[in-house]
Image (cartoon, rainbow, N blue to C red):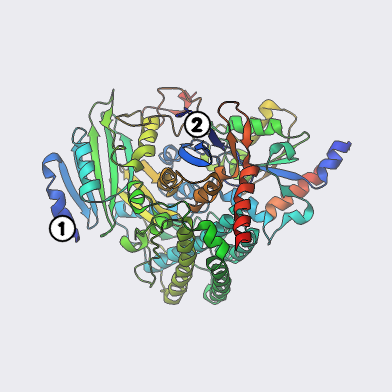
Amino acid sequence: MKKKYKLPIIASGPVHPLQEEMEFFQLYIDGETVVDIDVRLSYNHRGIEKISESLQFDQVPFLVSRICGICSASHPLAYVQAVEEIAGITPPERALYVRTIINELERIHSHILWVGLAGHFIGYETVFMWAWKYREPVLDMLEKITGNRNNYGNVKIGGCREDLPEGIEAEINPILDQIEKKMDMLTKAVLDDPILHARLKGVGVLKKEDAVNYAVTGPTARASGIPIDVRRDDPYAAYDLVDWNVCVQEEGDVFAKAVVRLLETFESIKIVRHAIAKLPKGPIAVEVKEIPPGEAIGHAEAPRGETFHYVRSEGGNTPARHKARAPSYVNVPSFKASCIGEKISDVLITLAAVDPCYSCTERVGVVDSHSKKVIYDFDRLFQLSREKTEKIRKEM
Amino acid sequence: MNWKIWSLKKSPWVFHVNTGACNNCDIEVVNCLTPKFDVERFGVTLVGSPRHADALLVTGVVTAQAAPRLIQAYQQATKPCVVFSIGACACGTGIFHTGYHVVGPVDKIIKEIDPNAIIAYVPGCPPKPEAMISGIVKTLNAL
Amino acid sequence: MSPDELVEKLNTIKSSLTQFEQLLNNRIYLSCESENCFEINKFLFQELKARFVIATAIDCEQYFEILYHYSYDQTGCVINLKCFIRDHENPQVESITPLIPAAEWIEREMHDLEGIEFNNHPCMERLILADDWPEGEYPLRKDWNHEKEI
């Protein structure tokens, strides 16, 4: 990556010690303030769009569920909706409900995961351990329904591959009650904590006009006062048949993003309950004969925002072109608006607030451009972030 | 058993390298550390630098851009070092084997620079945390 | 704005379009030539206030197509603007990044994978392919095959 200014840079990534993907960030800093940010991708580029052109229509859902392991229900759903639109297939109602249930369970576990990691970044280890513990029953539930903790592979063109197991209704409700109780406790602990208020409010603000220009989606947009949600705006699966609300906050800072995610968890629990209660009887899939030539788009609301798939068919067995866009692809560039002007110690949590692939934030090093000596490494930055929390705690 | 292997088997410290995985294996690796599985009880802990590590947990297909970084991480790790290929992608590139940007799998890249490397495989998409723990235990017993 | 009003508003730019299709109630496909593409994008983003979703480049062997996908969230309508680039040897189109910052990455990606030049792009660096990937190899073109690679 070329160097744009004569300022010290923070090189962040590509390999990071704790988790998730490789990504490479360069933060240009002036004193303690971030002036500009550059991103280099490619570490994770696997060429999925090209591979997809060589797979048959019904094999592609397995491929696209491996775009992102945490959004592994939303990607295939968006793709399948596009193909169903080309072929003019309407899946049976029960299949729509099963899709809704799996997608919402995915959202619950993903949002709890985010809360935990966000706590970890500001030195709140208790939240990290709690959240990841409360997430486990959701994964067990998904394993019971689909046979796997992640990568469910349950959606296919024309419906679903597997029905819900017998008697799942009786099991799922107590687990939802239990998660709701725990999340209630966690939400109160997070939202009422004066330290977290001081640490997160007004940090990493993404203004509404920036959010429009960077076309962000999902919780990132909703925390900046843009009330968009594909589930409501262009209903798919059974979202127009159950009762739920879109959570919007106006502030655009890290705290607002946390609030949106926490409140959405409760909405998701509500959706699953409704869907289980209203679950109709009947077949779960219709037979699909062939995919005619045509083109269509499909989109779905993943935990991080809108996943968008465009499929073109020329009447063969394989897609002629398949474009997939993950939500982070538009959310990550918005760092340019939210990180600039922030202090270094706030960058970690600002980056994390978008819920990108956490990568980078884990291995940050400040390099002085003249001597090429590492001034701050990740540990030092992590410590800075924690010290700031500690300082605020003492002042209170 | 020489003393290096003997000391490797006690409390192995692991470093996690993602070389183009989909996050699935990665969150399952983190899951191993959190209260339900909690491998720190057995002295297995994630460390922040390959220089401190006894084992590398490698996930992902190894993309063209990530391969040099994987090699660097392996070269920095203290030897003897066990390389765990976690997940179907790392073991044999899985569903991505026809990808133009994929140069893996992991064992191919590591064997190019060190033919005697110790490589262990934990297949699955993603492998469950139990599978990872069992993979680590079996490997350490086999050393 | 109701769906009918949306269609009515889109009719005001009909002179620069070559085709107007409404496949489903909330899926609109517009077609245009590459010269008019910037103006129409400007209309969709600034006048209509539609949200830019992504762009897709397609190699159709004799020509290139770029689909700009917009979402009009008030009605859930997805507007797809197809822009045809007739010159297959030397494909060029005006960049929309100065207008829509969100398009920066996808234009760099299309430049990497399909070899389309975007004029006036503020930062046309390699984004998605590896550092050592050879110049002039565009993996998403139809005539590119895997065996040729590196």
Same subunit: marks 1 and 2: no
Label 2: element kind: loop
* Residue located beneath label 2 in the image: A7
- Nearest the viewer among A201 and A252 is A201
Residue at image position (60%, 27%) is: A372
**Which quadrant would residue C107 be assigned to in this image?**
top left
**Residue A278 at x, y = what percent?**
41, 76
Label 1: element kind: helix
Q: Is residue A245 left or right of residue A178?
A: left
User: Of circles 1 and 2, which is in front?
Assistant: 2
Q: Which quadrant, please, contains the N terminus of chain B?
A: top right
Chain letter of mark 1 equals C
Indicate the amino acid at tag 1: Glu
Q: Residue furthest front?
A: A395
**Residue A265 at x, y = what percent?**
49, 66
**Which quadrant would residue A319 be assigned to in this image?**
top left
Indicate the amino acid at tag 2: Leu
Inspect this view and state whether residue A259 appears. yes
Chain letter of mark 2 equals A
